[in-house]
Each structure stands twice: as C-alpha cells, then as structure tokens.
Image (spheres, rainbow, N blue to C red):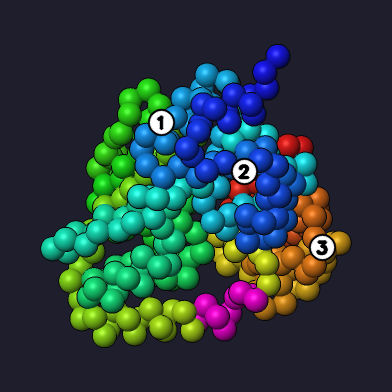
Amino acid sequence: MVSWQEKANSALKGIKQRYQVPMAELTTFKIGGPLDLLVEPENMADIQKVLTFCQMEKLPWMIIGMGSNLLVRDKGIRGIGIKLGGIFTHDEFYEGLVTAGAGMALGDLAKKTACQGLSGLEFACGIPGTVGGGVYMNAGAYDGEMAGVLKKVQAFDVEKGTIWYDKAELDMGYRHSRFQGSGQVITAIQLDLKIADKENATAKIAELTCQRESKQPLEMPSAGSVFRRPVGYYVGPLIEKSGLKGFSIGGAQVSMKHAGFIVNNGGATAADVLKLIEHIREIVKQKFSVELIPEIRIVGEE
C-alpha cells in the first residue's frame, strides 16, 4: 500500500517539501517534536493542490507561519504544516491602499507603512508573527488590534476558491476571527490606514520598539504572552503577586523580566511548559479567584 507521504511527493511536485521537520526549528519557543510534512506554497494554485490533497487523503493540516504563538507538544504534529511563501510575502501600496500577503512578517509591514507616511498599524511593529496569523488571532498590542485597521481579507476555501471578506464579515473579537476553525487559509489583506506625517509615524514605531525591548524578554525563546488578559486585570502583575516570577519547571521558567511570559531557559520540553501553565493557573485561581485562559495555541499529538 502506498503511503500518503509517497503520494504527496508526486501530487505536490513543484512545491517545496520537507519531511520530519523538528518543530523546535520552526517555533520561537524552540520547542516541539517532528512535523510529518512541511510544504511551502508560493501561489494560489499551490494552495489549491495542498488543500485538495489533504481533503482526498483525509489529512489534518495547519498554518505554521512564523511559529510565534505556538506551543507544539513533544510528539510533534501529524499531517501537513503550511508555511506561505512566494506571492504571499509581497505587498503593494497604491494611493494609500495597502495590500499585503498573509505570509509577510506583520512587524515588517507595520514599519513599511510608517515609512510610507501611513498611520494605524504602528501597534503591530513588535508582534512577531505573520500578517495572516495577526488576522487569525486578531493580534493586538498598545491599545491597537488588527480589527481596527482591516478593510478586507482574502481567504482560500477548498470548495469555494478565493473569497474576499469585508470588514463587517470578519467576526473579530478579542483574539478571535471568523477564520478560527473555518478550514480556510488567509492569503491576503487590505488595510484601512490614515495618511500621516512620516516622521511622526516612524517615531511612534521607535517609541513602541523601545518600550517592548525594555519590558519583554526578547532575548529568550518564548511564545509571547501566554495568557489572555482577564477583564479588570493585567496578567503579569497577577502572576508576580502570586509569587511565581522566576518559578520554573524543568527548562520552562516564568520570565524574570515580565511574568506574563514563559521562557525556554534551555532544553525545555512542551511537557515542562504545560505543567508550568497549569501550575500558574491553579495558584492564580487560589489567590485571586481569576481564571487564566491560555492565549498561545497548543497543538500536536498528546
């Protein structure tokens, strides 16, 4: 019997493929077991091929992006991981309208828009993910979020093909969008930005970058903020007041710089991080009666 991997070799010919890729190489946490197959589609035809193949073979798939909001379990990920390349990493500026591919780094796009004298995306200058990931999670920082700047989003659906969604159709909420669980791949966005003074916009980027560098443990592998912000509280102070700043399990540690982050202190496993997450949740619940909900995506075989 021919394995799905052998079928993929021919069915996805012409698309970059890598087998048994350690997810520790693809995530900012530097943690995670092997991914069965990583593919890098460069255009819509490639995406159609990949999703059609997954549908025919009944294979799970997921977008990997920059691996910045991801904790991959130690046994790794079954099925296919998709990392967008080619046209999905391009952008276009035309009379104030910005169109960007979902595979672009969101922080790079924020800096580029500021340099073009456009304001609104400055908040995203330090978000370490892709444009598509930013939309998927409705990423936000410094009182801004993707929902506030989106005009349209393009997605690919294996049954319906390419679809453009208007802002009103995006169902954006706190760390939520219509694309979660939709089976669609976000491929591009259009932004609704304001014409601004270029110097002011770039100065804002510099200011936010400085704030981020001073307060967040950027020098250590992590997945960013671990928990969603509970109503009426800030996560970092809650964890710090619970006496957990610097607390560690195995190689996973609550950051000494910002208690809302868990860092990989060297050799951390996903199991270490998951135990630490549960310990934090338990202690914070005991002390403050506040339920902390993970913001990072936890994926992979249990």
Rounded to the nearest angstrom, the CA distance separating label 3 from label 1 is: 38 Å
* Residue 48 - label: 1
Name the residue carrying label 2. Answer: 18
* Of labels 3 and 1, the one closer to you: 1
Please tell me whether residue 85 belongs to the stretch shown in magenta: no
Q: Residue at x 36, y 72 (%)?
A: 111
Rounded to the nearest angstrom, the CA distance separating label 2 from label 3 is: 24 Å
Q: Nearer the viewer, residue 131 or 81?
A: 81
Q: Quadrant of residue 29?
A: bottom right
- Up-down relation of residue 206 to residue 103 (above or below): below
Q: Residue at x 70, y 42 (%)?
A: 20
Residue 291 location in percent, x, y?
A: 66, 52
Name the residue carrying label 3. Answer: 267
Circles 2 and 1: CB atoms closer than 8 Å: no
- From this viewpoint, which residue is outermost toward the left? 95
Residue type, label 2 = Arg
* Of labels 2 and 3, the one closer to you: 2
Residue type, label 1 = Gln
79 left or right, relative to 83: right
Residue 114 location in percent, x, y?
A: 29, 74
Q: Secondary structure at mark 2?
A: strand
Q: For the magenta stretch, what is the residue range? A: 211-219
